[in-house]
Image (spheres, rainbow, N blue to C red):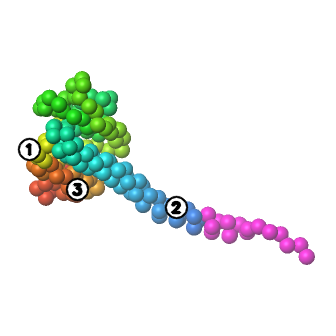
């Protein structure tokens, strides 16, 4: 008796159609998951930078600042978007707006975010040893999905950050 092993053409077509259907159904979900993960990573890195700045200012009894940076060593010119990367440093001379001068210790540098844009209402952030920043700040982390998928880090006058999907006034976040 001659038994040949293999698949018939209808079985093969059915299996390929089923695989294509599952792939078409699941691919958009994978895209959303990837975008959510990238945005969450950036928001968490920014939160970590804010918490580190607050604690270092208290620990050092001095001013610790965050500013956008193009080279991971110095503050970028005013108006530089935060998604280019940012640095955290000890602002010994307490200048405002914060500018990293020679001899001021660089605590950490953060890489550029290539998948999105950060809308910020502050060019630099400075934290003082008594726990106050002095001004409120909002940083909206936006990607290609726009305001419905954006997340904001809202920093109070005391320097405490919180994450929200709405602006400080309760409206939709602005993503340009």
Where disc 1 sits, the SS reads loop
Quarter holding residue 20: bottom right
Labels 2, 1: front one: 1
Kindly identify the residue that appears in the image at 26 percent across and 57 percent down: 148
Question: Mark 1 Cα within 10 Å, few/some/many (few <14, many 20+)?
Answer: some
Can residue 125 be seen in this snapshot? no
Picture layout, residue 150 above or below residue 57: below
Reply yes or no: does residue 125 show up in magenta: no
Q: Which mark is residue 76?
A: none
Quarter of the picture containing the C terminus is top left
Labels 2, 3: front one: 3
State left or right for residue 96 relative to residue 31.
left
Name the residue that disc number 3 marks. 163
Name the residue that disc number 1 marks. 134
Quarter of the picture containing the N terminus is bottom right
Most foreground residue, 158 or 38: 158
x, y percentage for residue 101?
A: 21, 25
State left or right for residue 27 relative to residue 100.
right
Total residue callouts: 3
């Amino acid at each position: 008796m001659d038994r040949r092993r293999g698949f018939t053409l209808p079985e093969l077509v059915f299996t390929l159609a089923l695989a294509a259907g599952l792939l078409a159904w699941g691919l958009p979900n994978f895209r959303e998951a990837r975008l959510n993960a990238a945005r969450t990573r950036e928001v968490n890195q920014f939160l970590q930078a804010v918490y580190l700045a607050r604690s270092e200012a208290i620990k050092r009894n001095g001013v610790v600042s965050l500013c956008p940076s193009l080279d991971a060593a110095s503050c970028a010119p005013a108006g530089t978007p935060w998604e280019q990367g940012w640095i955290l440093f000890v602002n010994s001379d307490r200048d405002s707006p914060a500018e990293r001068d020679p001899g001021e210790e660089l605590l950490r540098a953060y890489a550029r975010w290539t998948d999105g844009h950060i809308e910020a209402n502050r060019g630099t952030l400075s934290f003082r040893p008594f726990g106050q920043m002095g001004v409120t700040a909002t940083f909206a982390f936006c990607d290609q999905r726009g305001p419905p998928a954006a997340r904001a880090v809202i920093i109070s006058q005391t320097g405490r950050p919180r994450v929200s999907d709405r602006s400080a006034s309760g409206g939709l976040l602005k993503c340009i």
